[in-house]
Image: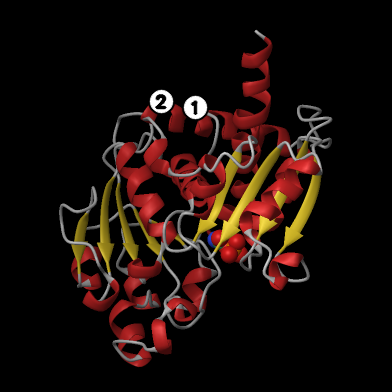
């Protein structure tokens, strides 16, 4: 694995290998000394051209727990805001000694461009690109599901589990990466949204689609993943249906959560609009693994950096 850009680039064996490494990384995080010497002498640059809390902090924590040096670079306050190009930014990072670049951008394809432009030769990790993909978010979601529900259907992993993903699919890089990864790992996925926010027909992606949340929940899914309505990506700031109607028809209320099977989990990648797509009491309730998703993000991102930097270095040396 040279880069980590898209779930579409992964085989099932590669995805399972990253999940297995994540499990090993998680085991190290419960020890009193959590730091590993694995990436001593390497420098990871977090190039964040779009706002982030969870992803940026967890990549920083992951790199530091592997003993890498970390340079945090945000567009605000940098020469990007003066109009410097992505190419010149990349060349500058390379000149500063970056061994890997973690990139978040509002432009779909930015991570792919950096990886395949020939401008720099370092591994690139996609930390979310526009409405395209957020592959490490999907990995941490799958990791969280596997820890709670893996093997439930009698086979290893997520085979046969049913995951319902609800919300603003149109603008969601999380939805795309999760559909690709969960289906790769053998799960059945149903996307639920109002028609205006659901650009996919059954068969376009490896999943089912529905406009009726109550009908999807009546199937007794093993997990429900709620997504944020991304007002900032809506051209002209428009919203359809109205916010009140959206919350009534597509929000995960206490009543809806109570109808789920006893074992069913509630996930949300964050940031959440509490009281809109998810009731605060559900987000904080016993089914919720939302805080655990954040914690698991560090282990999964340690695993991704390990696969790109440590295991590649060993292959080069052999
Ligand atoms: N889930 C996620 O990507 O959150 P941040 O935007 O805070 O990184």
Residues 118 and 175: in front is: 118
On the question of residue 43 being in view, the answer is yes
Q: Are marks 2 and 1 in contact (CB under 8 Å)?
A: yes
Q: Is residue 190 left or right of residue 293?
A: left
Residues 225 and 5: in front is: 5
Where does label 1 land, which residue? 17
Rendering coords of residue 34 (x, y %): 79, 37
Rendering coords of residue 39 (x, y %): 77, 30
Badge 2 residue CB within 8 Å of ligand 1: no
Instruction: Give the image quarter of residue 154.
Output: top left
Q: Residue furthest left?
A: 202
The disc at residue 13 is 2
On the question of residue 263 being in view, the answer is no
Rendering coords of residue 77 (x, y %): 78, 70
Question: Measured along the vertical axis of the image, is residue 5 above or below residue 245?
Answer: above
Q: Is residue 180 left or right of residue 295?
A: left
Quadrant, the C terminus: top right
The disc at residue 87 is none
Q: Residue at x 84, y 30 (%)?
A: 41
Q: Residues within 10 Å of mark 2 (few under 14, many from 20)?
A: few
């Amino acid at each position: 694995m040279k880069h980590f850009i898209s779930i579409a680039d992964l085989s099932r064996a590669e995805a399972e290998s990253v999940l297995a490494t994540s499990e090993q990384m998680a085991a190290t995080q419960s020890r009193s000394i959590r730091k590993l010497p694995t990436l001593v002498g390497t420098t990871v640059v977090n190039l964040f051209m779009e706002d982030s809390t969870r992803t940026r902090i967890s990549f920083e924590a992951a790199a530091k727990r592997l003993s890498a040096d970390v340079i945090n670079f945000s567009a605000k306050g940098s020469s990007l805001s003066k109009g410097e190009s992505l190419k010149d930014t990349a060349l500058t990072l390379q000149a500063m000694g970056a061994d890997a670049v973690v990139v978040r951008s509002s432009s779909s394809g930015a991570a792919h461009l950096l990886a395949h432009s020939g401008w720099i030769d370092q591994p690139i990790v996609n930390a979310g690109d526009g409405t395209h993909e957020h592959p490490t978010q999907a990995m941490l979601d799958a990791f969280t599901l596997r820890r709670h529900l893996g093997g439930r259907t009698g086979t290893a992993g997520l085979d046969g589990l049913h995951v319902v993903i609800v919300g603003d699919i149109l603008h969601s890089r999380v939805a795309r990466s999760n559909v690709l990864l969960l289906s790769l790992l053998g799960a059945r996925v149903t996307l639920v949204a109002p028609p205006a926010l659901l650009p996919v027909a059954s068969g376009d992606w490896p999943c089912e689609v529905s406009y009726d949340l109550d009908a999807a929940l009546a199937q007794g899914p093993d997990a429900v993943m709620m997504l944020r309505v991304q007002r900032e990506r809506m051209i002209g700031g428009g919203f359809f249906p109205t916010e009140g109607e959206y919350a009534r028809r597509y929000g995960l209320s206490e009543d809806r959560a109570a109808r789920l099977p006893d074992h069913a989990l509630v996930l949300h990648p964050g940031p959440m609009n509490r009281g809109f797509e998810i009731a605060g009491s559900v987000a904080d309730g016993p089914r919720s693994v939302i805080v655990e998703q954040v914690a698991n993000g560090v282990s999964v991102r340690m695993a991704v950096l390990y696969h790109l930097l440590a295991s590649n270095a060993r292959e080069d040396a052999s």
